[in-house]
Amino acid sequence: MTNALIEKLTRRDIVSASELTALAEVLDAPRKVDAHVDIVLEHAYTEHSILLLEGFTARYSTLADGRRQITEINVAGDFVDLHSLLMKQMDHGVVTLCPCVIAHAPHSRLRRLTEEHAHLTRLLWLDTIVDAAIHRQWLVAMGRRSGLGHLAHLVCELFTRLSAVGLTEGQTFNLPLTQTVLSDALGLSTVHVNRLIAELRREGLVRWSNPQVEILDWPRLSQIAEFGPTYLRLHSQPV
Amino acid sequence: MTNALIEKLTRRDIVSASELTALAEVLDAPRKVDAHVDIVLEHAYTEHSILLLEGFTARYSTLADGRRQITEINVAGDFVDLHSLLMKQMDHGVVTLCPCVIAHAPHSRLRRLTEEHAHLTRLLWLDTIVDAAIHRQWLVAMGRRSGLGHLAHLVCELFTRLSAVGLTEGQTFNLPLTQTVLSDALGLSTVHVNRLIAELRREGLVRWSNPQVEILDWPRLSQIAEFGPTYLRLHSQPV
DNA sequence: TTTCCGAACTTACATATGTGAATGCAGAGA
DNA sequence: TCTCTGCATTCACATATGTAAGTTCGGAAA
């Protein structure tokens, strides 16, 4: 099984055969997880990181009153908590949004990898750096864009990331997120997300019939979102 | 001059003498920079990272209509663009908010450091990971907290980070940020930031006479902010 | 002392988005 | 077929926050 992580890393830089072996040896056997399961608990101390092989997960924080803010949507090929290797205590939880396949990567093996493979370490480091860049784009969208621009940006981001790991077909992709999940990601109410999706449809920008999303007018959509893909670092450049 | 970076790293893990030397050798001589100067340009390709030794800087993105979103406030001891080592192209700009002292760290030397010092590399990696954690807290505050809670959270964050590098005196610290800068950081209007600061004062939570901020009631302030400091990783834990 | 200027602060009004509560709808199971 | 259940959708109304345009204040320069 060729996994999406390799595909993503290979887009960024050359990965040698010995690095591929090292990476494979870090991972435990894949396992299936149901939808709506917490695979990482908020505030937990953990001894392994988790690679998402198939499906969608969300990183989230819970407020005192029970409301939730999602801080990133993860797709196949993403380490959902690689940072726990060095953070030790989780600063957020991770929940599956649909049935997923994951693989554990024990911290002990990851740490050994950082001792023996400097270049591969930089590639993993880069992956956490791209997470931070994604967070920054969300901050810009949340702080300064209109609701519509914000939603449009999220659609563009997910399309681009899924496309990079071969999970789009033409302009169509599978997005098994409820409007409640979207509202927790955008920091809006479900009612308003519903209004915004209706607007994207009315404007002829997307065809959206859960869980299928088709982008009908990428130029206009990405313009409304002011989306530029460079922050995702999907181009090749030695690291 | 013992710098704030060492102080921060030492809080997180033991830093050996040879690592201290390696770190010092990465840096060019300190230089002074005026207030309101762009020290890193949006979208630039850069060959060095910048360590902030004294002062305050902001990471920001500019929208098409000229509005601005600040995504992080950096304080003494922060690398303001360490991620450019692997990202290559900057996804945001960095501007000084007051007169600053900085030091350049050429990427060539930083890359050599990652080849020779695995543990120190992990410490630098951790620093970028904490940046991401800060971004996530901002997302939570921006998406789900009230304006007041959001501002309170920023005050708590900055107090804690400044305290970690010895830049607070009791409950007082220097914060040379205009209300315009604050509004760009919070994603609010200047008018509303003014209202919120007035409310913090009225509630007896802070004494705020620019650039001096004194926290009068930390328990209540941090409760309004739902602030917990663990995400800043200021506790010692081997990496 | 006077002028100037950036920042803080205020006011009046506009609106994007939230809240609470229905209603509709389709798939899963009994 | 019927019921359940989770989700999408709609409605009426409330409000946090934005916008535009001031006024005030205090320090720096002349």
Image (cartoon, coloured by chain):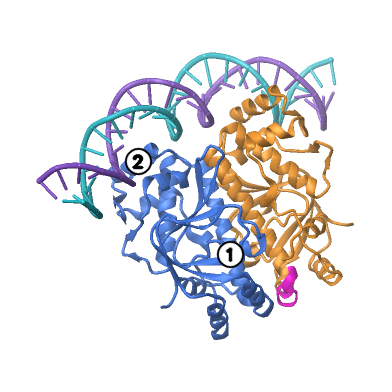
Chain colours: A orange, B blue, C purple, D cyan
* Front residue of this view, candidates A65 and A25: A25
Which residue sits at x=46%, y=53%?
B227
* Secondary element at image label 2: helix
Q: Nearer the viewer, mark 2 or mark 1?
A: 1
Please state the horizontal and vertical placement of residue B223, each as a whole percent of the image: 41, 50
For label 1, the SS is: loop
The chain identifier of the residue carrying mark 2 reads: B
Magenta residues span A112-120
Percent x, y for residue C18? Answer: 52, 31
Residue B155, above or below D2: below
Instruction: Name the amino acid, label 2.
Output: Asn
Q: Which residue is mark 1?
A: B82
Q: Does A118 appear in magenta?
A: yes
Are there few (<14), some (14-19), or many (20+) residues within 10 Å of tag 1?
A: many
In the image, residue B62 lies at what x, y percent?
54, 45
SS assignment for the magenta stretch, majority: helix
Give the letter of the chain under mark 1: B
Mark 2 — residue? B194
On the image, the x and y values in percent for residue A83 come to 64, 62
Give, as a three-letter code, the residue at label 1.
Leu
- Figure quadrant of residue A68: top right
Q: Is residue B98 left or right of residue A42?
A: left
Is A192 situated left or right of A233 in this image? Answer: left
Placement of the C terminus of chain B among the 4 image quadrants: bottom right
Rendered image quadrant of residue A47: bottom right
Outermost residue to the bottom: B17
Q: Is residue B44 above or below residue B197?
A: below
Which sits in the foreground, A174 or B227? A174
Q: Residue at x 73, y 75 (%)?
A: A112
| Residue B182 among magenta residues | no
